[in-house]
Amino acid sequence: MTHFTQITELLSYFASLAQWEDRYRALIQLSQSLLTIPECQKNEILLLPGCESKLWLDISKTSDGKIIFIADSDSKILRGILYIIQLYCSEYTKENIANMNFTSLFEQIGVLHKLSSNRKKGILAIEERINKVMTDN
């Protein structure tokens, strides 16, 4: 399955869910698919400050400029959000980063309006961290 197909299917799946509670459950289910940071590698450097829940991000880029994104959180909802970001970023390169807009993505799948202001700030902080890693060097 191609990256584009995975994203398209994810958007279609969320569009088929009429109720917020169904989307909430879907985020929790997606949290189980997140490629996570091993416990022994979680540290203060990877911890994203200012988040309501603990959120660790390890973002790097390959020699061909693609993102390697692993993350973890103590919140299942946030882990589901991280999985969607992980999926969304998995094929992006430095050239694509300027066009990323996670706020728009989560608005499109119908969950942004139900997230707390702190969770929304967390999404922006993740986007900023990715942009920083991708524009360094």
Image: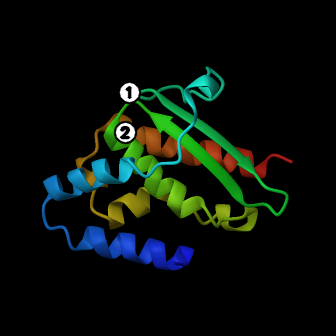
Q: Residue at x 29, y 71 (%)?
A: 13
Q: Which amino acid does the dot numbered 2 rest on?
A: Arg
Query: Which quadrant of the view contains residue 109?
Result: bottom left
Q: Residue at x 51, y 61 (%)?
A: 87
User: Compared to 88, does 120 lie above or below?
Assistant: above
Q: Residue at x 65, y 62 (%)?
A: 98
In front here: 33 or 130? 33
In front here: 20 or 64? 64
CA distance separating discs 1 and 2: 7 Å
Identify the colour scheme used.
rainbow
The mark that comes first in sequence, 1 or 2, is 1
User: Compared to 122, does 28 lie above or below?
Assistant: below
Query: Which quadrant of the view contains residue 117?
Result: top left
From the top left corner, tell me how far across and down residue 122 is, in percent. 45, 38
- Residue 52 is tagged as 1
User: Compared to 24, does 88 lie above or below?
Assistant: below
Q: Residue at x 43, y 52 (%)?
A: 33
Query: Which quadrant of the view contains residue 46?
Result: top right
Q: Evaluate if marks 1 and 2 touch, with contact meaning CB atoms under 8 Å apart.
A: yes
Task: Look at the numbered disc 1 and give the secondary structure of its residue.
Answer: loop
From the top left corner, tell me how far across and down residue 83 is, in percent. 45, 52
- On screen, residue 128 versus residue 133, left or right, reads left
Residue with the mark numbered 2: 119
From the top left corner, tell me how far across and down residue 30 is, in percent. 36, 54
From the top left corner, tell me how far across and down residue 66 is, in percent. 73, 61
Task: Look at the numbered disc 2 and give the secondary structure of its residue.
Answer: helix
Q: Which amino acid does the dot numbered 1 rest on?
A: Glu
Categorize mark 2 by other alpha carbons within 10 Å: few (<14), some (14-19), many (20+): some
In front here: 36 or 112? 36
